Image (cartoon, grey):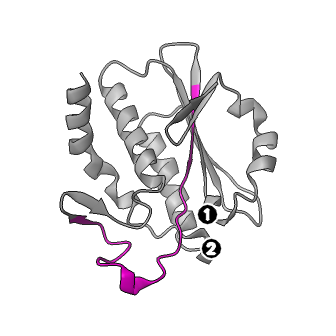
Amino acid sequence: MVKDIHNYEKNQLNDFLDYLAIPSVSAENKGIKETSDWLVKTFEQLGAQKSEKWERKGQNPFVYAEFEGKSSKTVLFYNHYDVQPARSLDEWTTEPFKLTFVDGKLIARGASDDEDELMTRLVMVKWFQENGGLPVNLKFFVEGEEEIGSLHVDETVKEHAKELAVGGFVWKNAYIK
């Protein structure tokens, strides 16, 4: 089964590559609306029962999504959709927001700092949706200010504590109860 999932991931990744091409640079206020819109739409296409932006004036939107699984247990995934500016362009051997494969590896700004993890999670949701459904309920909390200090996470979590209540959550590759 693991081999099947790995092959599926490699084949389905193309569905989400346009995510990496959006220059979502919070420090420069670039691509934030486009990226958060893309996430809401993608969660909807994957069958989320709820997919929405939590917006307040003066902050980048948080994207929240809920998926129904086959169990009463719920896991929350935390991700961020913003990336660092692509400074020192002379150090880039490819264009930062043009998806390029080099020696079998995908090169793009943010491809190895959380955008890759979110893409993998999206592929996972798609796989389960196509293969009998999710084993547990899933929630996604995706912020757009991590690269500038997560300025509004605390207040947003407090404001949406009911929606974010779960049995455990995954941050990066760590599961926390």
Quadrant in which the N terminus appears: top left
The label on residue 147 is 1
Tell me: residue 74, above or below residue 158. Answer: above
Tell me: residue 14, above or below residue 23. Answer: above
Question: Is residue 51 in the magenta section?
Answer: no
Residue at 19% over, 57% down = 104
Amino acid type assigned to the residue bearing label 1 in the image:
Glu
Residue at 55% over, 70% down = 25
SS at mark 1 in the image = helix
- The answer to whether the residue labelled 2 contacts the one labelled 1, judged by CB atoms less than 8 Å apart, is yes
The residue beneath circle 2 is 27
Distance CA(mark 2)–CA(mark 1): 7 Å
Name the residue nearer the viewer: 15 or 26: 26
Give the tally of numbered discs: 2
> Which contiguous range is marked in magenta?
75-101
Relative image position of residue 109 (x, y in whole percent): 41, 67
Name the residue nearer the viewer: 93 or 70: 93
Name the residue nearer the viewer: 38 or 27: 27
Quadrant in which the C terminus appears: top right
Relative image position of residue 7 (x, y in whole percent): 20, 36
Tell me: residue 85, above or below residue 148. Answer: below
Relative image position of residue 83 (x, y in whole percent): 52, 65
